[in-house]
Image (tube, grey):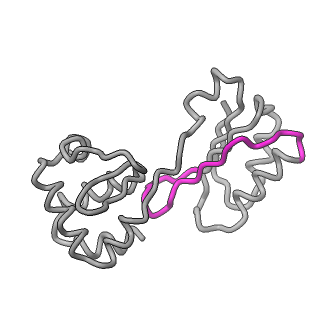
Amino acid sequence: MWSNIKKSLEGYPERLKVARVLVENGLSVRDGKIFLNEIEVPPVRIARVAGVDRRTVSETLIAIKANRELRLIFEGLRSAGHSLKEVAKHLDLGVVEITPVDAKIPGILANCAMILTKNGLSIRQAIVDDPELSPEPKLTLIAERKIPGELIQKFLAVNGVAKVSVY
């Protein structure tokens, strides 16, 4: 998806910044307006986050509307929802963050989830960064309770796992 967006906005680095903010935040573009699910977001807010002026946001919205492929992508975007990662500590939940050697290696999510399951931990949430958008994608698993430190070695033994952080 991101490679298609980059190709369509080639030669317009400022518009690409706007597109990145939209994608990273799950913001859709419908009828020339920006939405977080059903909440309209003012273009000036996007401009501030992207580090561009409001006109660049407007030009990006026009470019998206004019390009069928971009329009289909951005009309369909939705926020992935809330993340418990930042509040896990306060809720007595456990968090394990997995950094892969290569995010395209199959089985990392399944095998790491199985480690938690086999150790009696229920997964409350799984968040996976898109390797096309994130320079260092991670898998974050949030469990119903604290994750025992002895599981770190098991996670590190999973094919394709480079680094593990538990907190």
Q: Name the residue located 58 percent from the left edge and 53 percent from the top edge.
A: 128
Where residue 22 appears, x then y in whole percent? 33, 54
Where residue 151 appears, x then y in whole percent? 81, 40
Q: Name the residue located 81 percent from the left edge and 47 percent from the top edge.
A: 154
When the figure is inspected, residue 113 is found, relative to residue 3, above or below; the finding is above
On the picture, is 114 further left or further right than 54? Answer: right
Does 86 appear in magenta?
Answer: no
When the figure is inspected, residue 140 is found, relative to residue 130, above or below; the finding is above
On the picture, is 66 further left or further right than 26? Answer: left
Quarter of the image that includes the N terminus: bottom left
Quarter of the image that includes the C terminus: top right
Which segment is the magenta one?
A: 118-138
Where residue 141 appears, x then y in whole percent? 68, 44
How many marks can you see?
Answer: 0
In which image quadrant can residue 64 be found?
Answer: bottom left
When the figure is inspected, residue 64 is found, relative to residue 125, above or below; the finding is below
Q: Name the residue located 66 percent from the left edge and 43 percent from the top edge.
A: 164
Q: Name the residue located 65 percent from the left edge and 67 percent from the top edge.
A: 105
On the picture, is 102 further left or further right than 31? Answer: right
